[in-house]
Image: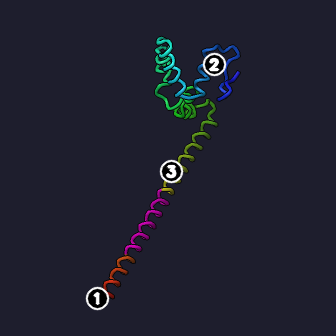
Amino acid sequence: MTTAATNIPLPANAGWFSRSEAWLDSKGKGAWIAAMVLGFVFFWPVGLALLFYMIWSKRMFNKGCRKHRHGSEYHMNFRAMRPSGNTAFDAYKSETLKRLMDEQEQFEAFLERLRAAKDKAEFDQFMDERADANRKAREDADQDA
């Protein structure tokens, strides 16, 4: 069984709470806040319980609810750095990661040089236009005199 909006796998015997939680997660943080407000309006202990649940599950302070279910990018990167137990694969992985990091540094240096060249070209164009304007102003002043 999965939710229709996000295809989050749910167990076949998922209860109403799990289905409700998955549905609210698929709608985003606004749905959680709306459910909490409605809980306070109709029966205040329900709103209070939803508020505590949102704080306890860290849904209140995340950018989105879907992130909470799937884990953050940091944790995925941490898992990728753990040794697998296969020394040949671990050596290959570390060499590949080192090569990719070197390529990323080279690419960032290239982008920095490209930005600097673009900035220099724009500045040179500005200075040329300014010099032309000054030259024309002097010529106009010499003709008027």
Dot 1 alpha-carbon crowd within 10 angstroms: few under 14, some 14 to 19, many 20 or more: few
Give coordinates of residue 77: x percent, y percent: 55, 35
Residue plotted at (48% across, 55% down): 109
Instruction: Determine which of the numbered discs, if any, sits on residue 105 in the image.
Output: 3
Say whether residue 88 is magenta: no
Mark nearer the N terminus (3 vs 2): 2
Dot 2 alpha-carbon crowd within 10 angstroms: few under 14, some 14 to 19, many 20 or more: some
Mark nearer the N terminus (1 vs 2): 2
Report the Cα–Cα distance between label 3 and label 1: 60 Å
Q: Return the residue nearer the eye: 104 or 64.
A: 64
Report the Cα–Cα distance between label 3 and label 2: 45 Å
Characterize the magenta stretch by its predominant secondary structure.
helix
Q: Return the residue nearer the eye: 99 or 6.
A: 6
Mark nearer the N terminus (3 vs 1): 3
Q: Return the residue nearer the eye: 89 or 10.
A: 10
Q: Quadrant of residue 98?
A: top right
Q: Return the residue nearer the eye: 111 or 23.
A: 23
Q: Amino acid at mark 3?
A: Glu
Give coordinates of residue 140: x percent, y percent: 34, 84
* Magenta-drawn segment: 112-130
Q: Quadrant of residue 2?
A: top right
Q: Amino acid at mark 1?
A: Ala
Pick the quarter of the image with the C terminus: bottom left
Residue plotted at (44% across, 70% down): 125
Q: Which residue is mark 2?
A: 19
Judged by depth in the image, the label closer to the viewer, 3 or 2, is 2
